[in-house]
Every structure is written in structure tokens, then in C-alpha cells.
Image (spheres, rainbow, N blue to C red):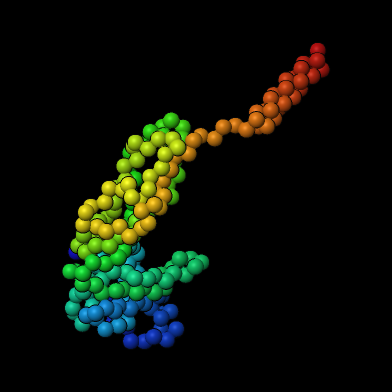
């Protein structure tokens, strides 16, 4: 596993103690699973933020306070709704030989032919829900949109996903679509023509006044 994180023991659980931990750059957390009894811990805020930016759904090798290491995944993150500060994290210990459910980012590549022709590309889905062994979780799933034309769309069922991965998202869910370019409404054209005529009259009036 490429991602690792060190946990420290946490004994004090009062609101004041937890607030002081955050001031010191620590994030309160808990880890639990079949092989790990529910344990309150803290992790370094900077390390956790860097990990979340890199791969929020990846398997993490968590070094526990007793010195042991366990593969875990982030189950839940609590944030301050105002400033998005990390308040608490739940780590779920997993078994590497048992499938897990998670989500993976969709990475769109290519220039859609429909967009080149003036169509409007609208991406509706950015993450795909999957189930597979922890070691099979990809960093992302590539979606080639080069051949999508105006008026066409792409569904989950059309994605090219490795055979070792089971897709849990609805196969009929819309991934993206390319809308036809919007035409100028008749009333807009009429209004523009009226503005042009008004402008011409104004220019003529200015010329007459000048003369």
C-alpha cells in the first residue's frame, strides 16, 4: 500500500480536550473493524489533508498506537459546515482478501466531436460506485469521450471497467450528454434589430445637429 498514516492514542474525550487537539493540528478519530476493537485516536491534520487530496477512497496502512499496522478505509468524515475544517474521521479496518464497496473518480479524456461542432458538454456523474478486492481499487476509471456527438449521451453501462471490478451504480445512470447549441430566440433577434435601428436613427440625428 502506497498510502500510510500514523495514529496516536487519545484518552481525553471532553469537548475542551478535543478542541485543544485541533488547535495542536490533530484530528480526533476512531478506528474499528473485525480485527480492531473500537479505539479512539488522533491523526495529524496536514498528513490527513494531503492524503484526502491525493486519494480519499484509497486503502490506507494505519499505524496504530500499539505499534501494529492495519489496512483501513475512511468510512465517514465530519467537517465544520462553515469553514470545512476537519472535525472527526471514522476509519474502518478491512481485510485485504474480502471485497469492499467504495467509489472511484471518473477521469474524462479526449475532445468530444460534438463539443467541437458547437455542442454543449454536460458531465452528470463524477464518481462510480464499485465493489472489488482492496488491492484492485483503481486510482480512477478513464472515460474516453472522443466519439460522443451532438444529441448523444453515455450511460454507466457503456463505461470500460476492468473485469475484476463489479459496478454498483445504476447501469442506466447518465454519465454525460452533449446538448445541441442553443439558437437565438426570434424575440431576441427582433430586439437586436430594433436596437440597431435605434442606433442608426441616433447617429443620423447627431449628424443633422452637427450640420
From the viewer's perspective, is 20 left or right of 163?
right
> Residue 203: x and y, percent?
74, 20
Asked if residue 13 is positioned above or below residue 128 in the image, the reply reads below
> Residue 129: x and y, percent?
34, 59
Residue beneath the point at 31% across and 48% down: 159
Residue 139 found in image quarter: bottom left
> Residue 138: x and y, percent?
25, 56
From the viewer's perspective, is 41 left or right of 20?
left
Residue 51 visible somewhere in the drawing: no
From the viewer's perspective, is 50 left or right of 116?
left
**The N terminus: image quadrant:** bottom left
Residue beneath the point at 48% across and 65% down: 83
Between 170 and 125, the one lying in front of the other is 170
Between 21 and 51, the one lying in front of the other is 51
Between 27 and 192, the one lying in front of the other is 192
User: Exactly how many numbered labels are in the figure?
Assistant: 0
Asked if residue 41 is positioned above or below residue 131 in the image, the reply reads below
Q: Residue furthest top?
A: 211
From the viewer's perspective, is 24 left or right of 37?
right
**The C terminus: image quadrant:** top right
Q: Residue furthest front?
A: 172
Residue beneath the point at 34% across and 74% down: 90
Residue 77 visible somewhere in the drawing: yes
> Residue 48: x and y, percent?
32, 67
Asked if residue 199 is positioned above or below residue 119 in the image, the reply reads above
Amino acid at each position: 500500500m502506497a498510502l500510510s498514516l500514523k495514529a496516536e492514542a487519545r484518552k481525553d474525550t471532553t469537548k475542551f480536550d478535543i478542541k485543544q487537539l485541533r488547535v495542536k493540528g490533530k484530528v480526533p478519530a476512531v478506528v474499528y473493524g473485525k480485527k480492531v476493537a473500537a479505539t479512539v485516536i488522533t491523526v495529524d491534520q496536514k498528513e490527513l489533508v494531503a492524503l484526502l487530496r491525493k486519494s480519499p477512497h484509497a486503502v490506507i496502512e494505519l499505524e496504530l498506537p500499539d505499534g501494529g499496522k492495519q489496512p483501513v478505509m475512511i468510512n465517514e468524515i465530519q467537517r465544520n459546515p462553515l469553514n470545512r475544517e476537519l472535525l472527526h474521521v471514522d476509519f474502518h479496518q478491512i481485510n485485504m482478501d474480502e471485497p469492499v464497496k467504495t467509489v472511484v473518480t471518473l477521469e474524462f479524456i479526449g475532445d468530444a466531436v460534438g463539443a467541437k461542432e458547437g455542442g454543449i458538454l454536460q458531465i452528470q456523474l463524477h464518481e462510480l460506485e464499485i465493489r472489488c478486492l482492496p488491492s484492485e481499487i483503481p486510482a480512477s476509471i478513464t472515460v474516453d469521450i472522443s466519439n460522443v456527438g451532438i444529441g448523444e449521451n453515455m450511460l454507466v453501462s457503456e463505461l470500460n471497467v476492468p473485469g475484476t471490478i463489479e459496478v454498483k451504480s445504476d447501469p442506466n445512470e447518465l454519465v454525460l450528454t452533449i446538448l445541441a447549441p442553443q439558437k437565438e430566440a426570434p424575440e431576441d433577434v427582433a430586439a437586436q434589430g430594433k436596437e440597431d435601428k435605434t442606433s442608426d436613427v441616433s447617429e443620423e440625428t447627431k449628424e443633422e445637429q452637427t450640420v
